[in-house]
DNA sequence: GTCCAGGTCGCCT
DNA sequence: AGGCGACATGGA
């Protein structure tokens, strides 16, 4: 990997195991728009990014200097050796071969904790396009204006401070439905208990999960998403309807309980559970594995 | 119209 | 511990 900055842009050259489109569209984040072939606009960490992939290079438009570039390199998790992760997983589990082959460019983003928490509270019992719509509505209503591209105005995902005054009704106006009180509870805890990345430092995965599950509307699955996507616990293995269907079919040949699946994931994937989960989820959802066709 | 969606809660046995 | 309906909203 090599970083070159010139005339307002930064180019990151020779990135292994990375596909911008796959990384954004695998279902881990919700604030992006595709504007061309391998070209995206995304809102993250309070900023707007216009990026395009050309082969093994990634162009970050309007990004100047090492500090800014490093920020995005960290966001895309580009300094991690995914070749090693894939080899480990394939060594343990031949079933993953096809998923890893087709979804080879997925990386797990290092997203902001509070954004992941609130986004995944919204995600329950909803389809991904609708989750994106709701998250955008909340950002437009409470977030900071961060730019306009192709006539579309973008707002950052709101900070905790920007959300403290939000009422249940405000969230309902953003079409959150029955999740509105959950969001209020989460925001008030984030604010009053100063709940942030720091407050999870040093906690074991299980301790961190229990802490998250004290929040109304956060169960096992959402807690695991927050651990994985927002707190850096790469062993966390969220089990949703898709994982349940896919793994029931592929690994058990029958319907399997979340507990059974969790156990298998722990034994097979161990510290790399989160990566395995993303490959399986994205591949399985794309190919509708285990889904009844009506 | 009916069913289901990156689930969780509350209440039941 | 495990089963089951309710919960808003929108798309298939």
Image (cartoon, coloured by chain):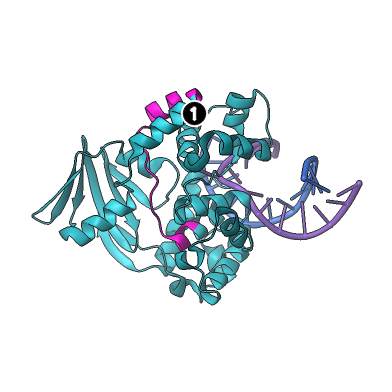
Chain colours: A cyan, B purple, C blue
Residue A185 in the image: x percent, y percent?
60, 68
Between A289 and A247, the one lying in front of the other is A247
Residue A133: in magenta span: no
Q: Is residue A114 magenta?
A: yes
Say if residue A242 shows up in the picture.
no
Residue located beneath label 1 in the image = A92
Depth check: A50 or A78 in front?
A78
Nearer-the-camera pick, A96 or B8: A96
Left or right: where A121 falls relative to A16 = right
Quarter holding residue A58: top left
Q: Position of residue A141 (x, y in %)?
A: 43, 67
At x 54%, y 27%, the residue is: A289
Q: Is residue A189 visible?
A: yes
Extent of the magenta region: A94-116
The chain containing the residue under callout 1 comes to A
Q: Is residue A268 above or below residue A97?
A: below
Residue A149 in the image: above or below residue A26: below
Between residue A52 and residue A33, name the one nearer to us: A52
Q: Eyeballing the image, is A49 above or below A145?
A: above
- From the top left corner, tell me how far across and down residue A219 is, in percent: 63, 53
Residue A143: percent from left, percent from top: 39, 67
Which residue: 45% across, 51% down?
A229
Quadrant where the C terminus of chain A is found in the figure: top right
Quarter of the picture containing the N terminus of chain A is top left
């Amino acid at each position: 990997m090599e970083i070159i900055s010139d005339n307002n842009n930064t180019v990151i050259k020779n990135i292994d195991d990375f596909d911008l489109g796959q990384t954004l569209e695998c279902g881990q984040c919700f604030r992006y728009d595709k504007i061309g072939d391998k070209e995206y606009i995304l809102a993250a960490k309070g900023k707007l990014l216009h990026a395009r992939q050309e082969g093994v290079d990634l162009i970050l438009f309007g990004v100047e200097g090492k500090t800014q570039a490093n920020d995005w390199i960290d966001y895309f998790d580009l300094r991690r050796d995914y070749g090693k992760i894939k080899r480990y997983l394939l060594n343990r589990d031949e079933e993953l071969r096809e998923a890893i082959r087709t979804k080879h460019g997925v990386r797990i983003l290092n997203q902001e904790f509070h954004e992941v928490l609130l986004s995944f509270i919204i995600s329950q019992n909803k389809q991904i396009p609708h989750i994106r719509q709701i998250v955008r509505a909340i950002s437009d209503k409470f977030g900071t204006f961060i730019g306009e591209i192709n006539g579309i105005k973008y707002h950052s995902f709101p900070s905790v401070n920007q959300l403290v005054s939000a009422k249940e009704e405000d969230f309902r106006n953003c079409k959150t439905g029955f999740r509105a009180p959950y969001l209020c509870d989460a925001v008030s805890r984030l604010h009053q208990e100063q709940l942030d990345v720091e407050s999870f430092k040093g906690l074991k995965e299980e301790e961190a999960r229990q802490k998250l599950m004290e929040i109304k509307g956060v169960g096992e699955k959402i807690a695991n998403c927050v651990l994985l996507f927002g707190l850096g616990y790469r062993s966390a293995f969220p089990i949703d309807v898709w994982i349940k269907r896919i793994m029931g079919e592929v690994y058990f040949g029958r319907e399997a309980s979340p507990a059974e699946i969790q156990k298998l994931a722990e034994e097979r994937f161990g510290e790399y559970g989160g990566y395995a989960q993303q490959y399986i989820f994205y591949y399985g959802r794309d190919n509708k594995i285990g889904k009844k066709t009506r």
